[in-house]
Structure formats: C-alpha cells, structure tokens
Image (cartoon, helix red, strand yellow):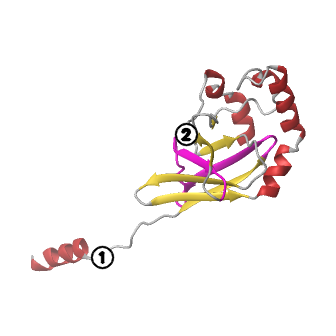
Amino acid sequence: MIRPVFLTLALVLAPLPALAHKVIAAVYADGALIEGEVGFSNGDMAANAMVAVSDPEGNPLGETATDADGMFTFRPSVAVAHVFHADLGAGHVAEVTMSAEDVAAILDSPAARAAAEAAADTGGIPGAGQAEAASDGGNPSTFPLDAASGTAAVGMADRRCNAAALAQDLL
C-alpha cells in the first residue's frame, strides 16, 4: 500500500522539463511588398498580432498585422532599413530587419513601379485603384502612417483581402 502511494508522490513531485519555445520571425521581398511571418519554434504562429515598422533609429514608418497564419505584408515607401517589431506578450518579442539595399530593390521592382503609376493615376488617394493596378492582389494588411498625425491611416481599401491571391502565395 505504501509503495504505490510513494511512487505516485514521487512522479507528481518530480521536476519536469520546461516546455519552452522561442519566437521566430522572417521577412522577404514579394514583388512590391515586404512579406513576413511571426511565430514560435514549436510551430504555433502569432495570429492577429500588431507589427510596428520603423527605421533603425526608431522613427515610425507604419504598422501592419499578422493574419490567422502569422503572415503579414507591408508596402515600403522609402529606401531605408525596415525594422519589424511585434510584442507577443508574456515576454515574447519578435524583431527582424530588412536591409536598406533589399528595400531599395523592392522599390525599384516592376510591381512597385506599377503601383506608383496607379497611385499617380488616382491623384495620390491612398488605396484607390490598388486592386486593379497592383499585381500583388492589393495589400490587405499594411496600414501606412498619416504624415500629419503620425497615426495609421486605415480605410476600406486598406482592409480589403484577396483570399484567392493570399492562398496562391502560400502554396
């Protein structure tokens, strides 16, 4: 009788290994966009997380959000290094940088030139004409900062999501 109780107590009170995981993040060029992903080393992705974008000195360039699969996109507008920062809570912070050279290559891409031409054709109205002109299916999660207020300028065009194009990109 004592033996099973002792064995049970020994198993319950024994130290167990910690089930720790690390934050992982990556960014890469995708046409006129910077695409990225944020998640954990155990395979869980950071769903619906806000991602702040700044230059290396901390000056804000905009913000974006991850989707349910931990993916995000951001349309750069200046050829400086872009730092992507996401606070995932509980001490988990993701930070990844795309170099100024890589951003400059994106801005000089055919897709970026087409998007710039489309913006010029619509009188510079943010989001207007994006779905028709941009070969990347729009930019569903980028919220550029309004230069005057320093806050995210979010309109219906910015919230548009082309699910078919997103699914194609993920395959």
Q: Position of residue 93 (x, y in %)?
A: 51, 58
- Identity of the residue drawn at 64% across and 25% down: 160
Q: Is residue 157 above or below residue 69?
A: above
N-terminal of the pair, mark 1 or mark 2, is 1
The quarter of the displayed image where residue 6 is located: bottom left
Quadrant including the C terminus: top right
- Identity of the residue drawn at 88% across and 36% down: 113
User: Label 2: how many residues lie within 10 Å, few (<14), some (14-19) or many (20+)?
Assistant: few
Residue 171 in view, yes or no: no
Q: Which residue is mark 2?
A: 68
- Tell me the amino acid under the disc marked 2: Ala
Q: Is residue 115 left or right of residue 58?
A: right
Q: Secondary structure at mark 1?
A: loop
Q: Nearer the viewer, residue 64 or 81?
A: 81
Queried whether the magenta region covers residue 31, the answer comes back as yes
Q: Nearer the viewer, residue 137 or 110?
A: 110
Residue extending farthest to the right is 110
- Identity of the residue drawn at 59% across and 28% down: 154
Q: Nearer the viewer, residue 117 or 170?
A: 117
The answer to the question of whether label 1 and label 2 lie on touching residues, with beta carbons closer than 8 A, is no
Quadrant including the N terminus: bottom left
Q: Is residue 48 above or below residue 82?
A: above
Q: Is residue 6 left or right of residue 103?
A: left
Q: Secondary structure at mark 2?
A: loop
The quarter of the displayed image where residue 150 is located: top right
User: Label 1: how many residues lie within 10 Å, few (<14), some (14-19) or many (20+)?
Assistant: few
Q: Which residue is mark 1?
A: 15
Residue 9 in view, yes or no: yes
Q: Is residue 26 left or right of residue 52?
A: right
Q: Position of residue 25 (x, y in %)?
A: 61, 57
Part of the protein shown in magenta = 30-56
